[in-house]
Amino acid sequence: MKLFDVYPLYNVTPVSAKGIVVTDDKGQDYLDFYGGHAVISIGHTHPHYVERLKNQLDKIGFYSNAVQNPLQVELAEKLGVVSGCEDYNLFLCNSGAEANENALKMASFVTKKSKVIAFNNGFHGRTSAAVAATDNPSINAELNQQHEVVFIDLNDIKAFEREISKNVCAVIVEAIQGVGGLDEPTTDFLQKVAALCKENDALLIADEVQCGFGRSGKFFGFQHHNIQPDIISIAKGMGNGFPVGGVLIHESIKAKYGMLGTTFGGNHLACVATLAVLEVIENENLITNAQELGVYFNEKAKEIPQVKRVKGRGLMLGLEFDFQVADLRKKLIHEQHLFTGGAKDKTVLRILPALNITKQDLDMFFTALKTVLS
C-alpha cells in the first residue's frame, strides 16, 4: 500500500526537536518559525509537557465519554480562568475542522435556521459544513456545496446588513485570518456584526483555531475587539502537537444528551496535553511574551526594504512582499535551514513560532531573511 498523494512535500525528514530547533535524519538543525501551522505553541518537547504526558500514560491513556473523566472538568475550569471565558461551557473534540463543524451545527440547533455568513479568504476546515464555509472552491466537493453559505468581504458592513436578515443561523469569522493571509476585521466592524447577530437571532462564531491560545497577544483574538461571541472554536496550539480541539459554548445555550458527541475527543491524554500547555502559558507569561515580541518583530521588519508591510498581531504574523514568496520559502528552508509558511495570498510569508521564543531567535530569523533577499 502507498500513501494517498495529496501533500506536496519538502525533502526534509524531522526525527527530533527541542524548543525552536528541529533536527532531520541527516543531523541538520532547522529553526522552526512555523510550528507546523501554528500548532507548536510552547516549543517542541517542552519538559513540563513531556512529563505530564508520560505520567498520564503510566495511568490511563483513553476511555470513552461514557464514563467520568475528572481531567475534563479540571481542563474546563483551567481554560475558563486562563482565557477569561468562565461564562462558557466546553465541548472537547479532536481538530479545528471538527470544532467548527460542531459550532455550526450548534448554531443551527439553537436558531432552527440553516444559512451561514462567512468571509472571503476565510478558512474553517475540510469537513462538510466547515469546508462549505471556507473560501476555496477547489477543496469543496459537490456534497459540500449543498450547504447554504454566503461569502462577503471583511469590513463590508453594508453587504453584511443585506445578508444578516435572510434566515441566517450563524456568522463565522476569524479575528485574524490564518490561511487567507493575516487580514483582520476592524473593531468597529466586529462590534456591528455582533450587535446585528443579536438583532437577527443569529449566533456569532469566533473561529479561534489558529489565532487562539495566546498567539495574538491576547488569549483569544476576538478579545482585541471587546465583543462576546456565542460560540468559540479552538484547536491547533491547544495541544502543542497532540490532536485536540474544542468548542466553547456560551452558558446561555443549554445542552441536551446526544446533541454533540465524539469517540476520541477529551480523552485523558488530550486533556493532559492541553492542561500542560495552559500551565506553561500561565507560568512563563507567554501571552505577554507574544505581545512584546510582536512589537519587536515589527521594528525589525522596518530594516528590510523589500517588506511592504507587516500583517497580524502578537506571534501570528505575516510579511507582505511585492512578489510571490514560494521561492523565498524554499531558499529559507534549504539555504538557511529555517521553516516558514505560505498563505492563500501568495505574496505573504507567514511566521507562526512557539510563543516562548526570544528576541535572539527573531534576530536569527531576520539575519537569515536578509541574507536570502540580498
Image (cartoon, rainbow, N blue to C red):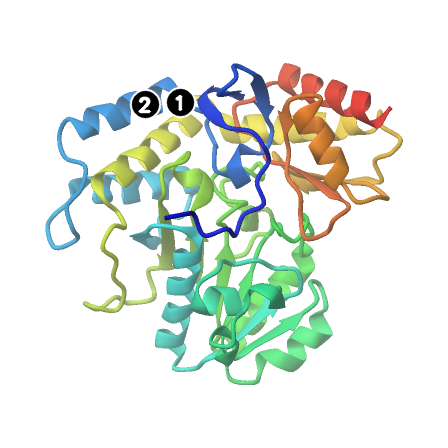
Q: Position of residue 304 (x, y in %)?
A: 85, 28
Among all residues in the image, which is located at the extreme bottom? Answer: 166
- According to the picture, the residue beneath numbered tag 1 turns out to be 45
Camera-side residue of 265 and 299: 265
As measured in the structure, the alpha-carbon distance from the residue carrying label 1 to the one carrying label 2 is: 6 Å
For residue 131, the mark is none
For residue 50, the mark is 2
Q: Using residue 344 as the reference point, say whether residue 97 is left or right of it.
A: left
Compared with residue 15, is residue 144 higher up or lower down, i.e. above or below?
below
- If you read the primary sequence from the N terminus, does the residue marked by circle 1 or circle 2 appear first? 1
Q: Using residue 328 as the reference point, say whether residue 236 is left or right of it.
A: left
Asked whether disc 1 touches disc 2, contact meaning CB atoms under 8 Å apart, the reply is yes
Q: Amino acid at mark 1?
A: Thr
Q: Amino acid at mark 2?
A: Val
| Residue at 84% in and 24% down | 303
Picture quadrant of residue 89: bottom left
Label 2: few (<14), some (14–19) or many (≥20) C-alpha neighbours in 10 Å: some
Q: Position of residue 109 (x, y in %)?
A: 35, 75
Compared with residue 249, is residue 305 higher up or lower down, i.e. above or below?
above
Compared with residue 356, is residue 37 higher up or lower down, i.e. above or below?
below
